[in-house]
Amino acid sequence: MTGQSVEWPRFAAISKNRLLESKVFQMTHISHSQTTRSERHNKSFYTGLCLSLALFYGHLAHAADSTPSILITPEGFRVEGFRVMPNVSLTESWNNNIYGTPANEESDTITTASASVKVNSDWASHRLNFDAGASADFYRKNDTEDVANWWLGTDGRYDLSTRSHALGGLRVSQNHEDRSSPDSAAGALDPTTYITSRAHIGFAHQLAPFTIRVGGVVENLDFGDGSSPGFDVDWRDRNQFSIGTRFSYQLNPQNEIFFQAATDTRDYDNEPVGRNSDGYRLGLGIRTSQGPGFEAEGFLGHMSQDYDNIALKDVSGLYYGASLKWKPVSHTRINASVDRAINETTYSVAGLDASSHLDTTVSGRIEHDLNPKLTLNLSLAYGKLEYQGVTLDLDEIAAGAGIRYDFDRRFYLSGGYRYINRDANNPTYEYDRNLFYLTIGYSPGSR
C-alpha cells in the first residue's frame, strides 16, 4: 500500500510495453518555436546523456561562479538553472479489508510517511530532470504488512537542433504487490516486493509536416523472497525489451495523425513453465490540441504475444488507448483514459498455467476549485482482467471522492474516501474494500 494506499488503484499488472508509454512516444509536437516536452512522471534517463548534459551546462552557465545562488520561492527553490520541488506528507488511513478477501475481513489503521524531490532544469534549450523519493506504510495491528517503496530516476533531452532531439532515461524503484493480487503468494508472511530497473533512449526528428521518433526500452524485474520460509519467487525475475517507432503527420497546428509500432520481448531468468515470449504492437491514431484547455489522443490497432511453451495460450486482439485532458472552465479539470494491454502473470490452477491476462481499463477524474484554497475531486475507474488459458476473469470498479485545503502555496490538508469492488468467476478473488484517509503535507508549487 505504500504510496498507493490513498492513490488511484492500478488494475494493470507489472509488465506493460514500456516503450509505447515512455517519453520516446509521449512527446508533444516539434516545431520551429517549440521543442519537445514530456508529461510522464515515471520514466527516466540514459546515463551517458545525463553526463553530457551536465558537462554542457557546466561549460555554459556561470562557469566562473563557484558559489551557487539559491532562490526560495513559493514554488520551491531555484538553484543555478534548476527548479527544486520537495514534497513531504503524512497520511493516516483506515482500511477495512487489507488482504482483499471475500470473507473474514481484516481491518487496520495505516500510517504512511512519504518524502520526495523533483529537480527540473529551466534552460532555454536541452532538459535535465531528477526524481527521487520514498514512502513507508506502518500498520497498527498487522506489522508484518509494513512495507517501504522507493524510487530514483533521471531523464533528459539533448537538442541537436530545433528539429532534432535525443532523449533517454534511467530509473530504479522498489514496489510491492497488493495482497489481493492472484499472483501474490497465498500464506506469505509479508507482501511480495520487487525492484524494477528501466532505461530508455530515443531520437526524434521533424521534416515538416512529418515527424519520426525511434527508441528502445529495457526493463528488469527482480522479485524479493521476503521473510516467509519456503516462498522462493526468484523464478519470477524477468527482463523485457522493446524497440519501436512512431511516424506523425501534422494536418494543421492543432491536429496530427500517427502510426506507431513496437516489439515486445519478455525473457525470464529461471522460470520452469517456459513463459518467455515475443510480441508486437501496431496502432494508428490521432492527436489534437485545442489550446491549453483541451488535449486528446487516441489510437486503434492490433497486438500479439506468442509464448515459447506451446501449452501456454498465445494472445492476440485489438490494441487501443486514449487520453483526455480538458479544462471546460477555469476552475474545473477533467482527465480520462482508456488502456488495453497484455500483462504477465504466474497464476495457475488445477494444473493449468495462465500465459497472461488481457487488461482493459477505463478511468476518469474531475477536480473543481470551490475557491482559491478549497478543491473537490471525484474519481471513477473500471478494469477487466481476462486470464488467458485458464478460467479466471476479474471485474474491478473503484470510486472515490476527496477534498483538499491549501493553507498557502506550500502546506495543505486533504482527506477522502475510496471504494473498490471486485467480481470474479472464482469467488476466492472477490472482495470489497473501503478506505478513509487524512493527509497533511508540504508541497510548494503544487497548487
Image: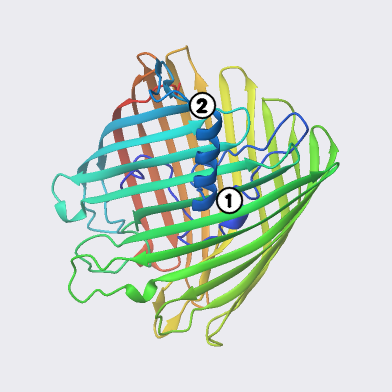
Name the residue carrying label 2: 367
The x and y percentages for residue 386 are 53, 66
Three-letter code for the amino acid on which mark 2 is drawn: Glu
Name the residue carrying label 1: 22
Residue at figure coordinates x 38%, y 53% from the top left: 173
Q: Observer-nearest residue: 165 or 59? A: 59
Vertical comparison of 346 with 403: above or below = below
Residue at figure coordinates x 56%, y 67% from the top left: 241
Viewed as shown, does residue 346 lie left or right of 185?
Answer: right
Is residue 432 visible in the rendered image? The answer is: yes
Residue at figure coordinates x 71%, y 58% from the top left: 245
Is residue 344 visible in the rendered image? The answer is: no
The x and y percentages for residue 37 are 63, 37
Q: Earlier in the sequence, mark 1 or mark 2?
A: 1
Three-letter code for the amino acid on which mark 1 is drawn: Ser
Give the crowd class for mark 2: few <14, some 14-19, many >=20 residues within 10 Å: some
Viewed as shown, does residue 203 lie left or right of 46?
Answer: right
